[in-house]
Image: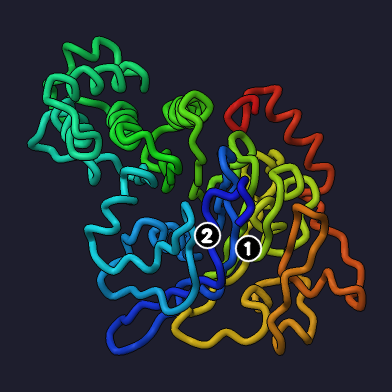
Amino acid sequence: MDENIILSVKNLEVKFKVRDRVLTAIRNISLDFEDHKVVAIVGESGSGKSVFTKTFTGMLEINGEVTNGEIWFEGKNLLENKKDEDWLKIRGKKIATVFQDPMTSLNPVRTIGYQISEVIMKHQGKSKEEAKKEAIELMTRVGIYNAEQRYDEYPFMYSGGMRQRIVIAIALACHPKILICDEPTTALDVTIQAQIIHLIKDLAKECNFTTIYITHDLGVVANVADKVAVMYAGQIVEYGDVEEIFYDPRHPYTWGLLSSLPQLGEKGSELFAIRGTPPSLFEEIKGDAFAPRSDYSMEIDFIEEPPMFKVTDTHYAKTWLLDPRAPKVEKPKAIQNLHEKILALTAKGGIYGER
């Protein structure tokens, strides 16, 4: 494995048993994560983003199973971990997760300080006094003022944004190599969202970890990501540098996501929406999963699944439109000259300010 690659996923497939039926949530995904980079995984709800990253820490629901593939981290295939004790060496300690709603991550009857200190004592083996000192330092680092005085307070005494800062502090308590941020700003108002985004960005530089963002908010992606993976119906349909995905997208689904950005809407005009709904993952999908919703579908899209075509050395897209025999089509009007539109928005403080 390339020394710049910290995590490598090969041919991953995940299935769930639901009421005597089988749902294929992840369909043959391969993806390499570069060390110290920020990778954003984007797509509609139900596309498999969270399920995909749960496999990195062995946190699939009890009815879920990895049926194929490998996940390589530090020279070991993580899917060889069969016991929870094996996963505990990875989960939290080396790969940590910040979840969507901080109240589901925090214990309401334990103090904030206790919850941070507990993680430090468990994973670092420090004494109670040492753990308390480090916990206060972490609280200060994530922007909690008067941390020493607030150490013994309970989660209900904190606002949503403050609670999310505490969850980030807990995640960083073990000095992880990878931080997975699963929709970390969804439950927060816009002003607090920007603060949390910038906090994670600054901490990544300071603590030197790799960040994996799961989000449906392309505004977040534009501001923080180095690489972007676009997911649809359990597959990665496009992958590339953030500039390539925003300014030279090639998959019709990526076109739809970008066209749906409310920031790009014009006053008095109707906001764009991708028509239809994602396919049922209980059924076998034939051809391109996005074909029934696309305005650019060809006959082959309903017959044969497209391969991943190479656009550049860093940019790939899974669409028959990149086949040399395909007709030439123009991307939607809404995302033409997108570079100029985003620069104008950024100048006004839109899409969460400057990169």
Q: How far apart are the two marked residues, 1 and 2, measured between alpha carbons?
A: 10 Å
Residue 44 is labelled as 2
Residue 251 locus on image (x, y percent): 73, 63
Which residue extends farthest front?
75
CB of mark 1 within 8 Å of CB of mark 2?
Answer: yes
Q: Nearer the viewer, mark 1 or mark 2?
A: 2
Amino acid type of the residue that numbered disc 1 sits on in the rendered structure: Ile
Q: How busy is the neighbourhood of tag 2: few (under 14 within 10 Å), some, or many (20 plus)?
A: some
Image point 64% across, 52% down: which residue? 2
Q: How busy is the neighbourhood of tag 1: few (under 14 within 10 Å), some, or many (20 plus)?
A: some
Residue 249 locus on image (x, y percent): 76, 54
Residue 289 sits in quarter: bottom right
Amino acid type of the residue that numbered disc 2 sits on in the rendered structure: Glu
In-image side of 228 versus 123 (left or right): right
In-image side of 150 versus 202 (left or right): left
In this view of the protein, which residue sits in the foreground, 295 or 119?
119
Whether 70 is drawn above or below 247: the answer is below
Whether 56 is drawn above or below 177: the answer is below
- Name the quarter where the N terminus is drawn: bottom right
Q: Is residue 37 visible?
A: yes
